[in-house]
Image (cartoon, rainbow, N blue to C red):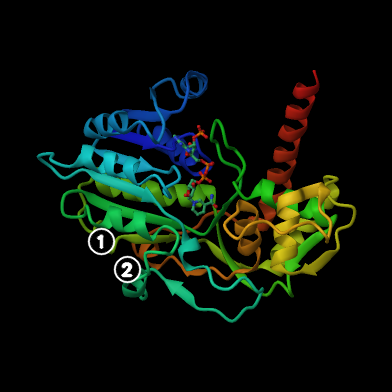
Amino acid sequence: MARIFFIGGTGHIGGAVLHKTVERNANALVTVLVRDAGKAQRLVSKYPQVKPVIGDLESFAVIEAASREADIVINAAPDITHDKAIESAINGLTGRSTKGYYIHTSGASILWDEPNGSKEARTWDDVDDIADVLALDLDKTHSVTDNLVRNAAADVNVAIISPGFVGGMSPSIEHPTPITTPGFILTSRAFKAGFQIAQGENQHAWIHVEDIADMYMLLVEKALAADQNCWGKEAYYFGVGEVIPFSDLMQRLAPVLHKHGVIESAKVQSVDTNDAAKASMYGANYSEESVPPAADSWAMHIAIMYGVNMRLRATRMTKLGWKPQKGPIVETFDEVFGSFLRSEREAADKGKA
Ligand SMILES: NC(=O)c1ccc[n+]([C@@H]2O[C@H](COP(=O)([O-])OP(=O)(O)OC[C@H]3O[C@@H](n4cnc5c(N)ncnc54)[C@H](OP(=O)(O)O)[C@@H]3O)[C@@H](O)[C@H]2O)c1
């Protein structure tokens, strides 16, 4: 019987992977790290066969013990600053009589370029460009944790999935909508319109959450079949289903935000990164005179995200037989933003009651 331990199994990505894992492996013993008893209870009501383990990314002994009991660990929780949680999972998997499997979630923000809305940029292929990916400076986001994972390759079968932006509705019990959703709403609310950096010619890699979940599932199948060919230091898989210019994305998003009452007009205005950062910091209280947020703030990170290129090709996963099944991500916007805004209203109503 397969034993699979999830870290981040309640997340937008992790929840979709967990759902498919349970659906396709009825006999697997699935354990999920959850932060509190309420989440554990909600998880078990949806998936009675799943065993929750209470803890967080600081619960190193809990993570190590649960990993030791598993054949496969899937980590879809945040990686940055959580080195010790990753080490704990790897330590748990190390020293078995047969090599265990660790599937890690990184992120392609490691390749972001200058946030100026320009289309002049490199396309990164996870096979052709793997030497350059492995040589990326340690000051790049995700580099340190990616290397931590790769350095365990002698003892554990490791693979890294590195998503572009993940969209679409997830069956996650806690995070059904994508993490980028509140940022788009906050920034648009501030501008009262759609927005793009300069002409919005920069291009973003996107993938539907169901399609990225299929990537994890393919690796799980390979692990269960003891297939040794898709693991190791070079087992770095970009998660991308399509690459879209930001202006095309916003042409489809602005009418959706207008329809749902977020913005007064569906027109799209060109802004610069500083304005986008102020908008992302102050939301509806934004004014052009607002003080810009700090360079290392979340608001600045979001604003930079709007203007960068992240052009990826998922050659390595395609070679394993993976193919995206879902349509264009822009077609998910109505459902995703409608759902997020409904929850936002419900939370506000509860707060008033
Ligand atoms: N989504 C994207 O577009 C994207 C793109 C590139 C990379 N990534 C990477 O993928 C990760 C997951 O993305 P996501 O969209 O699935 O995020 P998400 O919906 O926010 O899910 C994060 C998951 O990690 C758990 N978690 C977060 N902090 C934790 C802590 N301190 N202790 C224990 N569990 C913790 C959450 O648990 P709770 O349910 O308790 O909150 C949840 O299960 C991101 O953090 C990022 O590193 C995502």
**In the rendered structure, which disc, 2 or 1, sits on the residue that comes first in sequence?**
2
Percent from the top left, x then y, of residue 183?
68, 50
Q: Decide which of 311, 92 is in the foreground and name it.
A: 92
Give the structural element (helix, strand or loop) at label 2: helix
Q: Which residue is mark 2?
A: 134
**178 to the left or right of 50:** right
Q: Decide which of 136, 201 is in the foreground and name it.
A: 136
Percent from the top left, x then y, of residue 117?
66, 73
Farthest residue in the right direction?
264
- Residue at 33% across, 48% down: 103
- Residue at 41% across, 47% down: 81
* Label 1 packing within 10 angstroms: few (<14), some (14-19), many (20+): many
Residue 258 higher or lower than 175, as above or below: below
| Distance from mark 2 CB to nearest ligand 1 atom below 8 Å | no
Give the structural element (helix, strand or loop) at label 1: loop
**122 to the left or right of 233:** right
Q: Quadrant of the N terminus?
A: top left
**151 to the left or right of 289:** left
Q: Quadrant of the C terminus?
A: top right
Q: Decide which of 326, 350 is in the foreground and name it.
A: 350
Query: What is the quadrant of residue 289 in the picture?
Result: bottom right
Residue 184 higher or lower than 126, as above or below: above
| Distance from mark 1 CB to nearest ligand 1 atom below 8 Å | no
Q: Decide which of 208, 258 is in the foreground and name it.
A: 258
- Residue at 33% across, 50% down: 219
Label disc, if present, on residue 233 of the rendered structure? 1
Q: Amino acid at mark 2?
A: Leu
Kindly check if marks 2 and 1 are in contact, taking CB atoms under 8 A apart as contact. yes
